[in-house]
Amino acid sequence: MIKIWSELRVARVKEQVADLATLVWVVFWGNIVWRLFQFLASYTEAGRTIRAGGETMAQSGRDLGDSLAGLPLIGSQASDIARNAFAGAGQPLSDFGTQLEQFIFVVAVTLALMLAVVTLMPWLTRYLPWRWNRLRRVRAAHRAIRTAPSVAGAQVERALAMRAFARLDYATLLEYSPDPLGDWAGGRHDRLARAELASEGLRP
């Protein structure tokens, strides 16, 4: 079974609350960021409208030129004049519409990313390292203590007690044993072992 949370109730609730709060925070601000992007990006329609107007003007010039091409004597010249006149007016309009559309899209992306960074990064830069450390520790401890050992339970308990006695501070040891030094010297390893397991988020 894959370990996602600590086995101890208090530690597990703390991790689950942090996970849920992070999910709510990310969904909430992610939704706002997406709505902001959609709102700003909707103004690219103005650029598309201008571009379409310029393209329509140029196409009208081509259509008019095709119509004038059939006139006797001056048909060819009139056709070229019409096409060039409408193209000269329509092409800059079309180019401006394209540039405006691209500019608005870039602004929409930039502002949405800025809002995402401001709202999400401070939270995630604190949550993700803490959560990854908790997940890595509980999984490693579960494997080392529960899965990997090929020795007797009493030896595992003694090893855990030794690690707790050498690693944990006295305040923590006193939470599990009124006499941690006496327990270690007397070979009473159960409470010290429990302290070590609890420090890694595992139940006895």
Image (cartoon, helix red, strand yellow):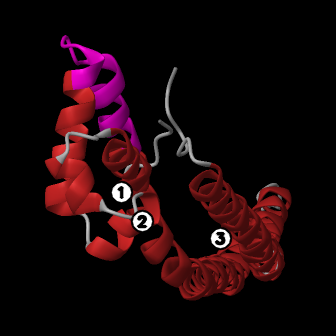
User: Are the residues at dot 3 and dot 2 in contact (C-beta closer than 8 Å)?
Assistant: no
| Amino acid carrying mark 3 in the image | Asp
- Residue 132 lies left or right of residue 68; in this view the side is left
**In the image, is residue 151 part of the stretch drawn in magenta?**
yes
Q: Dot 3: what SS?
A: helix
Q: Which residue lies under the disc numbered 2?
A: 130
| Amino acid carrying mark 2 in the image | Trp
Q: Is residue 13 above or below residue 80?
A: above
What's the magenta bit mostly, secondary-structure-wise? helix
Residues 10 and 109: in front is 10
Q: Dot 1: what SS?
A: helix
The answer to whether one can see residue 74 in this image is no
Question: What is the span of residues highlighted in magenta in the rendered image?
Answer: 138-154
- Going from the N terminus, do you reach mark 1 or mark 3 first? 3
Which one is in front in this view, the residue at disc 3 or the one at disc 2?
2
Image quarter for residue 34? Answer: bottom right
Q: Which residue lies under the disc numbered 1?
A: 133
Q: Residue 37 shows which numbered tag?
A: none
Q: Is residue 192 above or below residue 143?
A: below
Q: Is residue 133 above or below residue 87?
A: above
**In the image, is residue 139 part of the stretch drawn in magenta?**
yes
Residues 93 and 43: in front is 43
Q: Which residue lies under the disc numbered 3?
A: 80
Quote the CA–CA distance across marks 3 and 2. Answer: 71 Å
**Residue in the image at 14% along x and 50% along y:** 185
User: Are the residues at dot 2 and dot 1 in contact (C-beta closer than 8 Å)?
Assistant: yes
